Amino acid sequence: MKIVILERNTVGLDISVEHLKELGEVTIYPNTSRDEVEGRVKDADIIIANKSPLKEETLRNAQNVKLICEFATGYDNIDLDYCKKRGIKVANVVNYSTAAVAQHTFALCLYVLEKLHHYDKYVKSGEYAAQSGFSNFSIPFTELDGKTWGIVGMGNIGRKVARIAEAFGCKVIFYSASGKSACTDYKQVDFDTLLGKSDFLSLHCPLSDRTRNLINLDALRKMKKTSILINVARGPVVNDADLYTALTEDMIAGAGLDVTSTEPMRDENPLSKIMDSNKLIITPHLAWASTEARNRVVEETYKNIEAFLKGEDRNLVI
């Protein structure tokens, strides 16, 4: 089997992929641009990708391909209808980053909530040493305890976040964008109720026609002025320009983002103008990327290919 890894660097150079060579003849590319995909996969039996577009125009000359594996859970870079027509199987990795994303959700929230940037700078600048008192709380902050934590997307990550929020003393409510959630552990509400009641609102939903621009100016206006928005889902779930307006006009208190509408975030994105880290923190799509999670995604991909070679179905999307 000829196995082509299109984006080896997406799992980090500190994570080994060498054991994948046990499964076949492996060609490894650090990264692959859109224009390079077609040429690099034309002789492949198995393709391992992450963000590279795998659609008719890039797969049409790859007549041998039998399996596409994602170094990820999401598979919106793949044309599933075309793959189904060709008989190409698609496998992803599920639940590998749940702990990491949930952890980062609260890291973002607490950074903004407790104004940690301000207080760290206050101490390191020497201002704290120069004052007479033992403490400083010049920018007030509140507790999680007793507040309402709202969630969009009650999958594995959403449920993990809900449990942690409960441990902090929050009441948890959620909205199902698909309308198909079977979760009964927490109160399901309509979207307007979620917006109006949540002191903290975290997004854990996949990107779809239902969720694209879900958090727009109309939604942001319905949120509490004291609320904090956390997006660790997909960038386009939030309209960046509308969030810029909401933050600069104090419609909400703050936001923590691990994703933006384009990645890397471009200079023309209005959010890049907000330098106040007490109001907005942005991390470079790393919520999923703990060392454990990145090892896990490679190991699970190995097992997906191993199962395929044995004629077994494992983590198949189609």
Image (cartoon, rainbow, N blue to C red):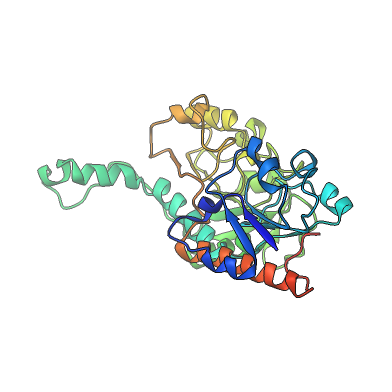
* Quadrant where the image shows the C terminus: bottom right
- Residue 184: x and y in percent read 73, 67
- Residue 258: x and y in percent read 51, 46
Q: Residue at x 43, y 30 (%)?
A: 274
Report the number of numbered marks.
0
Q: Nearer the viewer, residue 33 or 28?
A: 28
Work out whether residue 137 can be spotted: no
Describe residue 13's horizontal placement relative to residue 185 as left or right: left
Q: Residue at x 78, y 51 (%)?
A: 178
Single out the residue that lies furthest toward the right: 85
Describe residue 100's horizontal placement relative to residue 188 as left or right: left
- Residue 149: x and y in percent read 57, 55
The answer to whether 275 is drawn above or below residue 75 in the figure is: above
Describe residue 279's horizontal placement relative to residue 50 as left or right: left
- Residue 232: x and y in percent read 56, 49
Q: Residue at x 62, y 53 (%)?
A: 204
Q: Residue at x 52, y 29 (%)?
A: 244
* Quadrant where the image shows the N terminus: bottom right
